[in-house]
């Protein structure tokens, strides 16, 4: 049975990937900063949990040590730390946290898990459409998500033959927008209008792509865009 580590797997898209991976027969390890949440989901779906905080390298080292027996086939990392402000409002610590979640953290994942990953395995990073759609207030999110594409490309060369790819979702109704209350419907409607396919993303759109990448043995160094053509639609 192949083993998959899902970092950020206790909530939203990460949890959806963990659930699907269990259903597909993988041995799933949920890595999360909130170990209680990870433990709760792990018990529910038949997985195991480990504490991983992309802002704390020591947790990566400890997790790699714990999982080295038996090895790991695949790692999916969904971490993010949004800092949605204009340039004049930037906070240095929050800026660094955003880069740690999207770029520095995954690089340190590679550092500590390279000896643990099987050569036939893979690493899947998470980017986002905002990396290709500049706009006021999305500066940090745009730069960090855009940087994920280059992180995947260069890690693919460095870790070969382990495959490294990224997925870049558009607006997805994953539960992350529920906090908007009544404004959620408007956001999803505008997102649908901004695509070629006339709808917003669903969780399964992203999970299907992640699971395909785990098996796509001839794909490495790529960013797969899951946003209905939103990058290309100008009106």
Image (cartoon, helix red, strand yellow):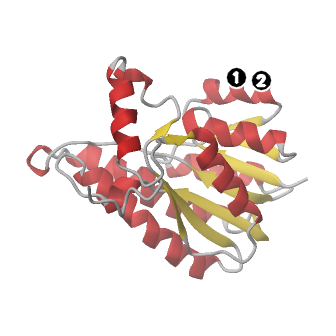
Q: Which residue is mark 1?
A: 40
Q: Nearer the viewer, mark 2 or mark 1?
A: 2
Say if mark 2 contacts mark 1, CB within 8 Å. yes
* Residue 164 vertical placement versus 33 (above, below): below
In the image, taking residue 10 as reference, residue 184 lies left or right, namely left
Q: How busy is the neighbourhood of tag 2: few (under 14 within 10 Å), some, or many (20 plus)?
A: few
Task: Return the x and y of residue 204 as percentages of the image width and height.
Answer: 64, 42
For image coordinates 61% across by 60% down, the residue present is 124
For image coordinates 63% across by 75% down, the residue present is 220
Element at badge 1? Answer: helix
Task: Return the x and y of residue 140 as percentages of the image width and height.
Answer: 27, 52
Which dot marks residue 44? 2
Q: Quadrant of the C terminus?
A: bottom left
For image coordinates 75% across by 30% down, the residue present is 42
The answer to which of 1 and 116 lies nearer the viewer is: 1
Task: Return the x and y of residue 52 as percentages of the image width and height.
Answer: 59, 43
Which residue appears farthest toward the right when viewing the image?
Answer: 1
* Residue 178 vertical placement versus 234 (above, below): above
Q: Quadrant of residue 202?
A: top right
For image coordinates 54% across by 63% down, the residue present is 166
Cα gap from disc 2 to disc 1, whole angstroms: 6 Å
Task: Return the x and y of residue 85 as percentages of the image width and height.
Answer: 19, 43
């Amino acid at each position: 049975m192949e083993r998959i580590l899902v970092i950020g797997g206790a909530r939203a898209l990460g949890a959806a990937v963990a659930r699907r991976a269990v259903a597909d027969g993988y041995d799933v390890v949920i890595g999360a900063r909130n170990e209680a949440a990870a433990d709760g989901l792990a018990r529910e779906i038949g997985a195991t949990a480990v504490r991983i905080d992309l802002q704390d390298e020591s947790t990566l080292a400890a997790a790699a040590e714990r999982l080295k027996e038996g090895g790991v086939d695949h790692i999916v990392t969904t971490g993010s730390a949004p800092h949605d402000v204009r340039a004049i409002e930037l906070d240095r610590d929050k800026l660094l946290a955003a880069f740690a979640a999207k770029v520095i953290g995954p690089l340190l994942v590679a550092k500590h898990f390279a000896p643990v990953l099987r050569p036939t395995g893979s690493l899947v990073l998470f980017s986002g459409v905002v990396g290709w759609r500049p706009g006021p207030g999305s500066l940090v999110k745009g730069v960090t998500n855009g940087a994920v594409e280059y992180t995947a490309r260069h890690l693919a060369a460095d870790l070969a033959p382990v495959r490294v790819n990224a997925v870049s979702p558009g607006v997805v109704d994953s539960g992350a927008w529920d906090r908007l209350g009544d404004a959620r419907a408007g956001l999803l409607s505008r997102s649908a209008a901004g695509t070629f396919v006339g709808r917003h993303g669903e969780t399964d759109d992203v999970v299907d792509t992640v699971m395909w990448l785990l098996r796509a043995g001839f794909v490495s160094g790529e960013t797969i865009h899951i946003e209905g053509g939103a990058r290309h639609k100008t009106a």
